[in-house]
Image (cartoon, helix red, strand yellow):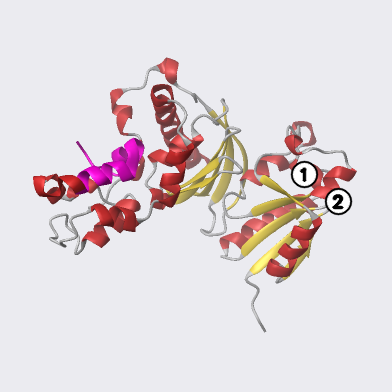
Amino acid sequence: MRMAKSVVIIITKVPYGHESVYGGLYTAIACSDRNLLAIVILLDDGVYSAMKGQASENLSYPCIEDLFYTLAPNVKVYVHEQSMVERGIERDRLIEIVEVIEDKRLLALLREHGDAIIKY
Amino acid sequence: MEIDIYKLMTETKQKKIETSSLLVTRFEIKETMPCFTTHGYIRFVAQADSQLDKVIEIIFLKSPPGIVTYAQQENAVTLRILNRLITIFSSGKIGVTNTKDLNEAHEILDKVKDIINEAYADYLKFGKPKPEDIEAVRKMSWIEIYKCLPQTNCQKCGYQTCSALAMTVLQGGAKLAQCTPLKDLKYHANLARLRKTLGPFLEKTLGLGS
């Protein structure tokens, strides 16, 4: 059995209301700390997780926006462009550490690094 | 000889930075996550009380090239110092890995504050760095330093070879001033070339001396 060298974590859920995003980020850190190349892709409603100015204080839940910064510097975070467009989100509303990725590059990235793909 | 890189980067702190020229006065720790590299350790993110876009490039220029990474797209700089990775973002967010607990986190943030305020003092003095300065440091390798050294392997610096000194200097583990022959008239041209290669920020950081 071949061991995976990289892991792609796809997050498709909104940041609050369940633990999907938190779980995805936790997994990304665990993979990265164990020397696996970890890549996070925010797809569909997952793109909301990377929006600036999240006020989670009243939810008694960790601020997902801030948690993304704990991934630095080894985990790369991509936001799916088409998912942003469908939700009317522009780049300047997202935190600076994410990179917007279009379909063609997303496919290439999955082909290159998708040894293991985990969806949240 | 072991050199404290944090101390090296904040040398002028001893000269006392005026309070009016401080960019950051406080941090707030926002979130923590586990750090799986060391059992029980955390990684955390903190928010500075200022935007840091003015100092990111200067921190990059002031750091030994072997311990710093500059992400131009995100305008962020990552330092491998104090036995951990510290990433400073232009938004004022600071990401830190491998930290024992929140007490240590506050100690680390105090040191990060010094690094930022030192860089801000340089910003006030020299202004925004030129893109060519950034590019020069990006391309800096130990070979560029080695090319300017006497290449005699005289061992007066304490290292076996000139290349070993060049590599260690780049990591911040030795100072260029340890190469005493560089100050001989004979190597005047080498010294001039080295100063030109390094530029003013790196010259100071890599300990070339006057």
Which quarter of the figure has residue B115?
top left
**Image position of A41 (left or right of A85):** left
Q: Residue furthest front?
A: B189
Does the rendering let one see residue B7? no
Q: Position of residue B191 (x, y in %)?
A: 21, 45
Q: Which residue is mark 1?
A: A49
- Looking at this view, is B114 or B21 the one in front? B21
Which quarter of the figure has residue B29?
top right
Residue at x 88% of width, y 41% of height: A87
Circle 2: element type: helix
Q: Position of residue B79 (x, y in %)?
A: 46, 46
**Image position of A89 (left or right of B119):** right
Q: Position of residue B82 (x, y in %)?
A: 41, 47
Contact? badges 2 and 1 (CB < 8 Å):
no
Residue at x 76% of width, y 37% of height: A60
Q: Residue furthest top?
A: B20
Is-magenta flag for residue B196?
Answer: yes
Work out how far the residue at label 2 is from the one at label 1, CA to CA, in angstroms. 10 Å
Question: Which portion, as a residue range, is magenta?
Answer: B190-210
Question: At label 2, which amino acid type do we have?
Answer: Asp
Q: Residue furthest right?
A: A86
Mark 1 closeness class: few <14, some 14–19, many ≥20 residues within 10 Å = many
Q: Earlier in the sequence, mark 2 or mark 1?
A: 2
Magenta: main secondary structure equals helix
Mark 2 closeness class: few <14, some 14–19, many ≥20 residues within 10 Å = many
> Where does the C terminus of chain B fall, quadrant-wise?
top left
Q: Which residue is mark 2?
A: A44
